[in-house]
Amino acid sequence: SFTALPANKQEQYLKIVQPYITNKTIRNLRLSTRPDAITIQNLLLLKQYDVSLIELGVQSLDDEVLRLSGRGYTSAVIYEAAEKIIEHGFTLGMQMMIGLPGSTHEKDLITAKEIIRCGATGTRIYPLLVFRDTDLERLYNNGKYTPLSIEESIEQSADILELFLNAGVQVYKIGLHPSEFLENGTLLAGPWIPAFRQHVQARVWHRK
């Protein structure tokens, strides 16, 4: 959540990469952050340092799902942040998750449609996973949360992928890449398999 850092720390990081912008080693910068960490002052700072794309970790646009997931903001905050980002000339990205507490496939489809309506040009789709030592683990162990199965997550992600493809929204990532924290026992439950994106894309092509 880059913009949640103190302003002087953000500027310190942004200054480090400016020589690479100047000599055209890189063309621009992109970052991810929380919707409730977007301010006009911060956007002006990012514009000054050649940031071009801001990706919001939205996860859901349903207020009840946001509350049950402990996200700490409402959908109104998300809409306001998205509007500010576009008004200040940035490209907007919005990440979403499926299978959150209190969510349904219908709610997740609405979130995808709202991401499109907000003007996002790119997105990520993450099925929710249960990790140890988290509030979600406690819900899972108490029988108050049931993660999606692998088949459910593939089928539902394929529905959402088709929505984004038809709207011309680029999908940067679907599911998590293999990494040590997925294989060291930290992952407790949930629909994770290697090459998850390929399974989802194959489902879309199979339908066609």
Image (tube, rainbow, N blue to C red):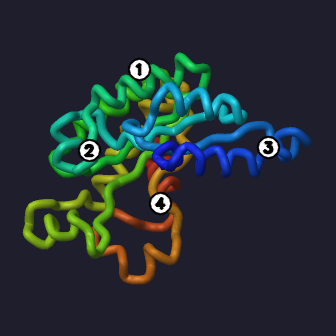
How many C-alpha atoms fall within 10 Å of the one at disc 1: few (<14), some, or many (≥20)? few
State which tag comes first along the sequence, 1 or 2.
2
* Outermost residue, right side: 23
Numbered circle sitting on residue 72: 2
- Rounded to the nearest angstrom, the CA distance separating label 4 from label 1 is 25 Å
Which three-letter amino acid code belongs to the residue tagged 4? Leu
The part of the image, by quadrant, that contains residue 114 is top left
Q: For mark 3, what is the residue?
A: 18
The mark closer to the camera, 1 or 2, is: 2
Callout 3, which amino acid? Answer: Gln
Query: What's the residue type where badge 2 is placed?
Result: Gly
| Foreground tag (4 vs 2) | 2
N-terminal-most mark, 2 or 3: 3
* Numbered tag placed on residue 176 in the rendering: 4
Left/right of residue 146 with respect to residue 84 in the rendered view:
left
Q: Is residue 10 left or right of residue 140?
A: right
Q: Secondary structure at mark 3?
A: helix
Which residue is denoted by mark 1 in the rendering?
117
Q: In this view of the protein, can residue 33 be seen by the observer?
A: yes
Work out whether residue 195 or residue 39 is closer to the camera in this orientation and state it.
39
CA–CA distance between discs 3 and 4?
A: 30 Å
* Mark 1 and mark 3: Cα distance apart in space: 33 Å
Whole-percent x and y of residue 190?
A: 29, 65
Picture residue at 28% right of the left edge, 53% below the top = 152
Front of the two marks 3 and 4: 3
Q: Amino acid at mark 1?
A: Arg
Q: Identify the residue shown where x is 52% and y is 72%.
A: 179
**Rendered view: 207 above or below 202:** above
